[in-house]
Image (cartoon, coloured by chain):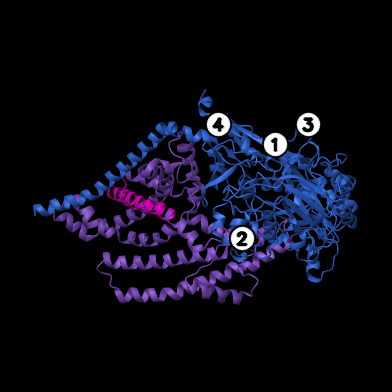
Amino acid sequence: MLTYILKRLLIAVPLIFGVLTLTFFIIRLAPGDPAAFFIQPGVSPNVAEQIRAQYGLNDPIPVQYFKWLASVLQGDFGRSFSRAQQPVLEVISEALPITVTIAGLTLIANFTFGILIGIVSAVRQNSFLDRFLTVTALFFYSMPEFWFALMMIILFALKLSLFPASGLNEIGAESYGPVGFVLDRLWHLALPVTVLSINGAAGIARYVRGSMLEVIRQDYIRTARAKGLPEKVVIFKHALRNALLPVVTLMGSSLPFIFSGALFIEVIFAFPGMGRVTVEAIFARDYPLIIANTFISGSLIVLGNLAADVLYAVVDPRIKL
Amino acid sequence: MKARVDRDVQGLRAPARIVLTLLLALLVLAVSACGRKGGGSSRNAAVMDSTLVIAMLGDADYLNPVLASTVTSGNIIGLIYPSLLQSEFDTQTGLMNYMALEKKLRPVTPGQGKKAPDAAIARSWSMAPDHKSITYTLRKDAFWSDGKPIVSGDFKFSYELYGNPVIASARQQYLSELVGADKGKVDFSKAIETPDDTTLIFRFYKPVPEHLALFHTSLTPLPKHLWKDVKPEDFRHSPLNLEPVGAGPYTMKSWQKQQEIVLASNRKSNLPKPGTIASIAFKVVPDYTVRLTQLQTGAADVVENIKPEDFTALLKANPQIDVKTVGLRVYDYVGWSNIDHEAYSRSGVIKPHPLFGSAKVRLALTHAIDRESIIDGYLKEYGVVCNTDISPSLKWAYNPKITSHGYDPEQATALLKAEGWLPGPDGILQKNGRKFSFVLYTNAGNARRNYASVIIQQNLRAIGIECKLDVQESNVFFENLQSRKLDAWMAGWSIGLEIDPLDVWGSDLKKSRFNFTGYRNPRIDRICELAKQKMEATGARAYWQEYQDIIHRDQPVTFLYWIKETHGFNKRIEGAELNISGTFYNVDDWRLRPSANIAR
């Protein structure tokens, strides 16, 4: 298995590198220009030119590419164009913890509730409860997140004023002490995490229900029941473990989400996370930041897939890598 | 066997335990939320009464006056840094007034000049009789917040930064009259002199009107003693950018990027005085609906640019909110390519556009568009029909005799008929086999322009013109505009308070970067030239009146409407005066009514 992992990692290097190279050229092909902001009446026409010179955008594209390559190989992704020349890795290191917190909490809630609802629906197939859960899950699954988020804000922030509408902390939260600060943070995270996890859990529940139903019909489940094992043992020990195999793949593919962020939620709740960084970078044509973000999400997709494959082999002894 | 079953039962309990833990966590959260709501408000009352919260769309880029390029940054810099002069827009005359401690450019008209000029560092100035130099005398009691005196050398040093091409300041244009600028490079040794700490002399290569000289020489200074060792190539990423040292009514307390900037009243300030409100928090809230919600719940006190369609609901939901308006600086227009831009970009040949090349056709299009109904349907009392790009707010220059080209489809049809555009078999106008059909482009994400474009499409359809709509991503749209690739588009301008329209209408299409229509009229070029030579702004009045007549006649674009900018304020703010030069023009004088009074 170790050789397999090493092999996959080695293949990943040229793959990610190829993705970065493609990104490098594609964003330069996109219309618009990082200095476009400075082309406006009242601003000297020289400014855009000087800014371009500062960013090194006046060189021919192949020259830009090799310069970029040289610095990336030294681990330097450059400085952001749109964020006051902050080094891009610094921009990302500020945004990442916020995104990871939200996504981490969301994933835990997603899988916990998703799996539980899935099991209940499968075991009580076609009961009222199953239909109710299925309809509810589909209802939430098909609801656009941004709209759902706004509705939650209107209900919980505006009408009931139980939770804040946006931000990570109250103004002056530093004075609450460490426990108060964390509680304040959690209080601010309650709405966004709920929105994200209701939506995600609904999807996972559908998966689990499907695969659970398939497993329950298998012969070994009948055998387990015939042995006289209690139903709960049959469901949780014999059926669930097998039914969770496809869910493991889901976990692997959730890895990029943890780091790339949930754009709509970040915009609506005013969290300065990775999703916002990426999209704002794209609109501002902030090339170094776009590439660094592509690097992060690209690597994570590759790693996530690898992790899913490896986990698969770990949980299912039938699969050999 | 029994032990095994027990273990299984325990294993089975694990998920149940997780659920229980989660439920408990949720409960704790809910309780803490309720606790915060009840107990929190009393704990926060003191904070609330001393903190003004302004929700804004995006973060400041730089809190460095040389580099800042956004309005948000400008607002905050205005509170932190000192300024040479105090400027104020006189709403009676529409002229900018500049004030030093002991001198004013113009007498203050009654009801204006609500701010004392105590913020100015200049005590007085004198303009040379030949208008080629201006000499300031500075006050001696002005200090940076680190205690060092503010001297003339700080200004000279800062102007060298503004003019440094490596730093690429967006305000280089302000230096364009200084000695040497005509030869491509300002000669700072001659252009700015500082014989002593309180004397500051600017020299120009040509005579400059006094108001323009004051405007262009009063850029915000940086403290030389802190910045002098920073190399120009490191200027943009110097750590000093994150710790601005100023002298104004506020100092920066904290700056969490993309989250909030908190300012605290500068107790030591005498420029003009410490800010009345103890602390001001600028919070970044990117989503418009959420900013609106925050205004409604009281989490934010000021939200700029509220859309007219939201007023009714907002005021009904929270009577503590007040909508204040300011304007008119912003207008929308439909641009028609006056020249055949394809021929121009192919071979540099200038010939009229096949559809919009004739002033009569453009006039017909203006008559065909029901601007009043766009205003009634969307902007309501916050919109005014626009005739030219000189704002009615610039009263000294505005030509009130111009009567709008009203909505008149018959007149439009007649004009088009006279130009040879006749209905074809499908009802669409035709001329020499060419249909009157085009695409109207606009940028994505602007509800107002979307609304207007649909009405325009219907209006034009009614007189037999086929207008297709297309929405482009802003970067793409802007680039297409600049390279003159569009036949027709809808966009807007925010005008400067000094009139200088040559960039937009100048005949030299290479130099006039914003002449997207390709409109050319030598008289307009001449008028702009003559107006600039007048040493007193009001002296150019006759030229600007003629200018408006010409633009109104030629209709290079169809001007749609002026927009009153509308900002939401919590009523606990007292003393807020809005000025066309900025929403936060006297924020240091604002007061917050204590929350106890609001409850009553």
Q: What secondary structure is the stretch in magenta mostly built from? A: helix
Q: Chain of mark 3?
A: B
Q: Determine whether the residue tagged by mark 2 lies in a helix, strand or loop.
A: loop
Q: Nearer the viewer, mark 1 or mark 2?
A: 2
Badge 4, how many Cα within 10 Å: few under 14, some, many 20+?
some
| Range of residues picked out in magenta | A98-127
Looking at the rendered structure, the kind of residue marked 3 is Pro
Whichever of labels 3 and 4 marks the residue nearer the N terminus, that label is 3
Looking at the rendered structure, the kind of residue marked 1 is Lys
- Which chain is rendered purple in the image? A
Residue B297 placement, left or right of B375: left
Which residue occupies 48% across, 57% down?
A274
- State the hue of chain B: blue
Badge 1, how many Cα within 10 Å: few under 14, some, many 20+?
some
Residue B211 lies in the magenta stretch: no
Q: Are marks 4 and 2 in contact (CB under 8 Å)?
A: no
Query: Mark 1 = which residue?
Result: B115
Looking at the rendered structure, the kind of residue marked 2 is Lys
Q: Determine whether the residue tagged by mark 3 lies in a helix, strand or loop.
A: loop
Residue B317: mark in rendering: 4
Q: Nearer the viewer, mark 3 or mark 4?
A: 3
- Whether residue B117 is visible here, answered yes or no, is yes
Determine the CA span between mark 4 and mark 1: 34 Å
Q: Are marks 3 and 4 in contact (CB under 8 Å)?
A: no
Query: Mark 3 = which residue?
Result: B110
Q: Are marks 2 and 3 in contact (CB under 8 Å)?
A: no
